[in-house]
């Protein structure tokens, strides 16, 4: 991976891009299959939106990694 003297390779960027797309697909699937009527129950609400929050956190971490790699 990149460091202060080495730029990221095309393979590095392609790998990060692929990871991002896979996480976005997971997020899309989770939102698409979200049972909104079941989410009105507090336990189901926490479970459903907790999973979305986990995916969002993963995407945030990956976006930060991409920014860090591409600016080094």
Image (spheres, rainbow, N blue to C red):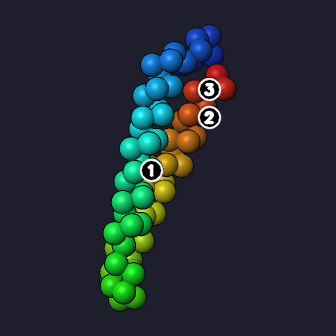
Residue 33 rendering spot, x and y as whole percentages: 34, 69
* Residue at the limit of the structure toward the top, as seen here: 5
Numbered mark located on residue 70 in the image: 3
**Circle 2 sits on which residue?**
67
The local secondary structure at tag 1 comes to helix
Q: Are marks 3 and 2 in contact (CB under 8 Å)?
A: yes
Q: Nearer the viewer, residue 37 or 50?
A: 37
**Circle 1 sits on which residue?**
24
Q: Residue at x 51, y 15 (%)?
A: 9
Q: Nearer the viewer, residue 64 or 18?
A: 18
The local secondary structure at tag 3 comes to helix
Q: Are marks 2 and 1 in contact (CB under 8 Å)?
A: no
Give the mark nearest the N terminus, 2 or 1.
Answer: 1
Q: Residue at x 64, y 22 (%)?
A: 72
Classify 10 Å Cα crowding around label 1: few (below 14), some (14-19), many (20 and above).
some
Instruction: Nearest to the eye among marks 1 and 3: give it.
Output: 1
Q: Are marks 1 and 3 in contact (CB under 8 Å)?
A: no
Residue 38 rendering spot, x and y as whole percentages: 33, 85
The local secondary structure at tag 2 comes to helix
Mark 2–mark 1 distance (CA, rounded to whole Å)? 17 Å
């Amino acid at each position: 991976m990149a460091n202060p003297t080495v730029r990221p390779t095309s393979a590095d960027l392609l790998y990060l891009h692929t990871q991002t797309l896979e996480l976005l697909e997971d997020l899309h699937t989770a939102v698409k299959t979200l049972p909104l009527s079941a989410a009105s129950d507090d336990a189901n609400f926490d479970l459903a939106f907790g999973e979305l929050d986990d995916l969002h956190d993963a995407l945030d971490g990956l976006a930060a990694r991409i920014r860090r790699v591409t600016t080094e």
